Amino acid sequence: MIRHLIFVVTITLLSCKKDSQTSEKAQHIDTLSNTSQKPIENSKQFEFTVATEKDFIEAKAKFKDKLTQDTISFPKINGEIKLPIEGKKPTQLSFRDTLLNTEDENIREYKYEGQFKQIDHYVVSGTFWEHYEIYLINKNTGKYTLLWNDPALSPSNQFIANLSLPFGLEGAPIGIQIWRINKTNNTSNFSISKHIEINPIDWAPTDFVWESDKVILLKVAKVDTFLNSIGIPHKNDYYYLKLSF
């Protein structure tokens, strides 16, 4: 089960991981060394530069998570979460747990995490046998965007970002996704489209924070350090990058 496999890392897994990271949507980048002092432009759409732990800590202190955790508003009843959809034809969206407390590979469990009121989207998580994912659900249409992991809304509500799952799951991507928030003709309705997806080859992110609306600070470690430390790098193995786009 996913809870038992997050930190299981093998050499075979590493080779599978690299093979799985080739896709048309993904933008692969070269390593930015933690000893580099010069900005390295990786794409016309974004660039990485070196950041510091101090930068990261200060940004964390200033950042305000905009997720409204109103979980008691939509409680799970008999293993089912029902979310109202407020479109032209009001309805409900249902998420039902299956095969809990078993070792069945078809097990699935859902949790209502809250909502981003600024963009009228619910956030629901799904936990499966060897997988975890996030559903960002439009409250007006019921349409959802599938994310790798927990999202954070940018300071002026223009973008959403999320990391990949913790390094170690076979076949799971490594990197960061950034999504653009688009206003539709109806000013109370928003759509979401992928802006950038970055899949680094030899480092993996473990945490991130918005520094400004188009700048993200990342806490990362080399893939090799995950392998050499049984999935948990030592404190000195981490370094920090600034992603500007």
Image (cartoon, rainbow, N blue to C red):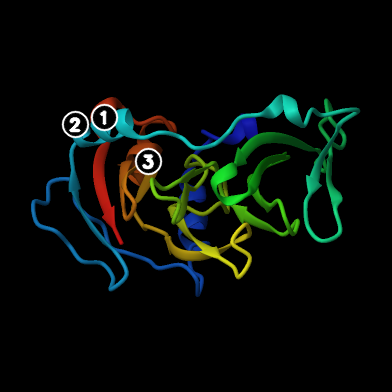
Cα gap from disc 2 to disc 1, whole angstroms: 5 Å
Q: Which is more toward the observer, 221 or 179?
A: 179
Left or right: residue 2 versus residue 155 is: right
Crowd band around label 2 with a 10 angstrom C-alpha radius: few (<14), some (14–19), many (20+) = few
Q: Does the residue at mark 2 contact the one at mark 1 (Cβ under 8 Å)?
A: yes
Residue matched to label 1: 57
Q: Position of residue 230 (x, y in %)?
A: 43, 31
What residue type is disc 3 on?
Phe
Say which residue appears at 66% left-offset and 29% top-offset: 70
Tell me if residue 15 can be seen. Answer: yes
Residue matched to label 3: 208
Q: Which is more toward the observer, 134 or 127?
A: 134
Residue 108: name its quadrant. Answer: top right
Q: Does the residue at mark 2 contact the one at mark 3 (Cβ under 8 Å)?
A: no
Picture layout, residue 114 above or below residue 148: above
The numbered mark at residue 54 is 2
Tell me if residue 1 can be seen. Answer: no
Q: Which is more toward the observer, 229 or 105?
A: 105
User: Which image quarter is the N terminus in?
Assistant: top right
Cα gap from disc 1 to disc 3, whole angstroms: 10 Å
Residue 219: name its quadrant. Answer: top left
Say which residue appears at 28% left-offset and 73% top-offset: 44
Crowd band around label 3 with a 10 angstrom C-alpha radius: few (<14), some (14–19), many (20+) = many
User: Which image quarter is the C terminus in?
Assistant: bottom left
What residue type is disc 1 on?
Ile
Say which residue appears at 40% left-offset and 30% top-offset: 232
Q: Position of residue 205 (x, y in %)?
A: 38, 44
Seen as rendered, the residue at the extreme right is 78
Cα gap from disc 2 to disc 3, whole angstroms: 13 Å
